[in-house]
């Protein structure tokens, strides 16, 4: 449960804040999908504007590789910490059902850790797909994607996978 909270919520918020800070400094170009909503609060219509976080665009492919490599390494370290913690907890268990559940949870985290390590390897071996975008000002920006089973997945989506 703590793993889901840490990787699913805290990690996503930390990365989102980092991306927002980089956007404010002009290091990245963040394309946000903006949607307008009408929300009713106690029967009163209130207009709301929501932005969804999408794969950011970097000035160079090297900046993108650097950002995502560091992010995946930090994510892998978090997963290693949780694996060690779960193994430490599992060895003290007497109930076979709780032990089995702990082993299943640990094996899932190990699988997720393997995916993080594979992402770092793909980034380091330049096996990523990059998309070039030209901003209205004429500057060039690059987005990074991973290719898995003939489909392209944004690097940011891979970073947020639990």
Image: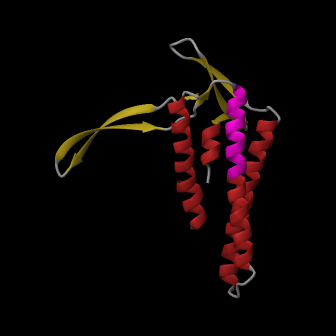
Residue 141 location, quadrant: top right
Expressed as whole percent of the image width and height from the top left, the position of residue 48 reads 30, 39
Looking at this view, is 24 or 90 the one in front? 24
Answer left or right for 80 relative to 131: right
View extreme (front): residue: 25
Expressed as whole percent of the image width and height from the top left, the position of residue 105 reads 67, 67
Any part of residue 151 in sight: no
Expressed as whole percent of the image width and height from the top left, the position of residue 30 reads 52, 30
Residue in the picture at 67% in, 32% down: 64
Any part of residue 134 in sight: yes
Expressed as whole percent of the image width and height from the top left, the position of residue 156 reads 61, 40
Answer left or right for 133 relative to 68: left
Answer left or right for 78 relative to 53: right
Residue 149 lies in magenta, yes or no? Answer: no
View extreme (left): residue: 43
Main secondary structure type of the part rendered in magenta: helix
Q: How is the image coloured?
A: secondary structure
View extreme (right): residue: 125
Residue in the picture at 40% in, 32% down: 34
Compared to residue 102, the image places residue 31 above or below, namely above
View extreme (top): residue: 138
Residue 135 location, quadrant: top right
Residue in the picture at 16% in, 49% down: 43
Q: How many marks?
A: 0
Residue in the picture at 57% in, 66% down: 2
- Quadrant location of the N terminus? bottom right
Answer left or right for 87 relative to 45: right
Q: Which residues are magenta?
A: 61-74
Compared to residue 15, the image places residue 108 above or below, namely below
- Quadrant location of the C terminus? bottom right
Compared to residue 37, the image places residue 104 above or below, namely below
């Amino acid at each position: 449960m703590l793993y889901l909270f840490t990787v699913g919520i805290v990690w996503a918020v930390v990365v989102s804040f980092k991306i927002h800070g980089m956007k404010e400094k002009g290091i990245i170009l963040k394309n946000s999908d903006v949607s307008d909503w009408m929300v009713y609060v106690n029967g009163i219509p209130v207009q709301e504007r929501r932005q969804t976080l999408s794969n950011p665009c970097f000035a160079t492919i090297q900046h993108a590789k650097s950002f995502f490599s560091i992010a995946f390494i930090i994510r892998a370290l978090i997963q290693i910490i949780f694996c060690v913690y779960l193994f430490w907890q599992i060895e003290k268990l007497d109930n076979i059902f709780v032990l089995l559940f702990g082993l299943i949870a640990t094996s899932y985290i190990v699988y997720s850790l393997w995916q993080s390590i594979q992402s770092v390897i793909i980034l380091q071996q330049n096996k990523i797909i990059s998309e070039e975008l030209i901003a209205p000002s004429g500057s060039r920006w690059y987005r990074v994607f991973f290719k898995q089973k003939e489909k392209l997945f944004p690097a940011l989506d891979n970073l947020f996978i639990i």
